[in-house]
Image (cartoon, rainbow, N blue to C red):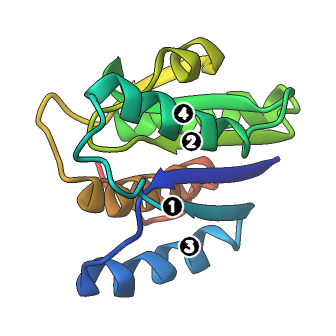
Amino acid sequence: MKIQILCVGKTNHAAIAQWLPEYLKRISHYIRIDWIEIPELKNTKNLRKEEQQKEEGKILLKHIQPKDVVVLFDERGKSYTSKTFAAFLQNKMNASTKNLVFVVGGAYGFSEAIYQRAQHKISLSSMTFSHQMVRIIIAEQLYRAFTINNNEPYHHE
């Protein structure tokens, strides 16, 4: 299995730009992971929220293949503990999923086309995080999940 992370917008915070490569390196010991940042739309002041979602959706869909399993990080998604998220990943691996694509949307979320394409939605919290912070949370939780699935001592209960 390969994991692909699609994010709208670039990482522009220095701390996140430093931490993210460390987690991606750690994850790469377990699985191939591709982190793809989609440039933010330009000249969005005249676009309605729905128009911006639709345009971002078109760009995201260009990076998603027909057989990919797509997971959205969405506030209305299912909540997981670190252990149940690890089990979710293990189930996808056991099902011979070739490409698992996690998607972080833009400031206004996802278009209807992206919601229709996704098989899963995951909520990281009932709280709202900046799109920058979400990147580190996702990377850390992916790493944590692989250490749980490999019975390594990173995760404590």
Which numbered disc flags the more N-terminal residue, 4 or 2? 4
Label 1 sits on residue: 143
Query: Relative to 137, does residue 58 appear above or below in the rendering?
Result: above
Residue 79 placement (x, y as % from top left): 32, 23
Q: Residues within 10 Å of mark 2 (few under 14, many from 20)?
A: many
Q: Which residue is mark 2?
A: 102
The answer to which quarter of the image holds residue 101 is top right
Name the amino acid type tagged 3: Leu
Q: Earlier in the sequence, mark 3 or mark 4?
A: 3
Q: Is residue 84 visible?
A: no
Name which residue type carries label 2.
Phe
| In the image, residue 120 above or below residue 124 | above
Q: Identify the mark at residue 120; answer none if there is no mark.
A: none
Q: CA distance from mark 2 to mark 1?
A: 14 Å
Q: Which residue is mark 3?
A: 24
Q: CA distance from mark 4 to mark 2?
A: 14 Å
Tell me whether circle 1 and circle 3 mark residues in contact (CB < 8 Å).
no
Kindly report which numbered mark, 3 or 4, lies closer to the viewer in this rendering: 4
Q: Which one is closest to the eye, mark 1 or mark 4?
A: 4
The number of callouts visible is: 4
Q: CA distance from mark 1 to mark 3?
A: 8 Å
Q: Residue furthest left?
A: 127
**Label 2 SS:** strand
User: How many C-alpha atoms fall within 10 Å of the one at disc 4: few (<14), some, or many (≥20)?
Assistant: many
Q: Secondary structure at mark 3?
A: helix
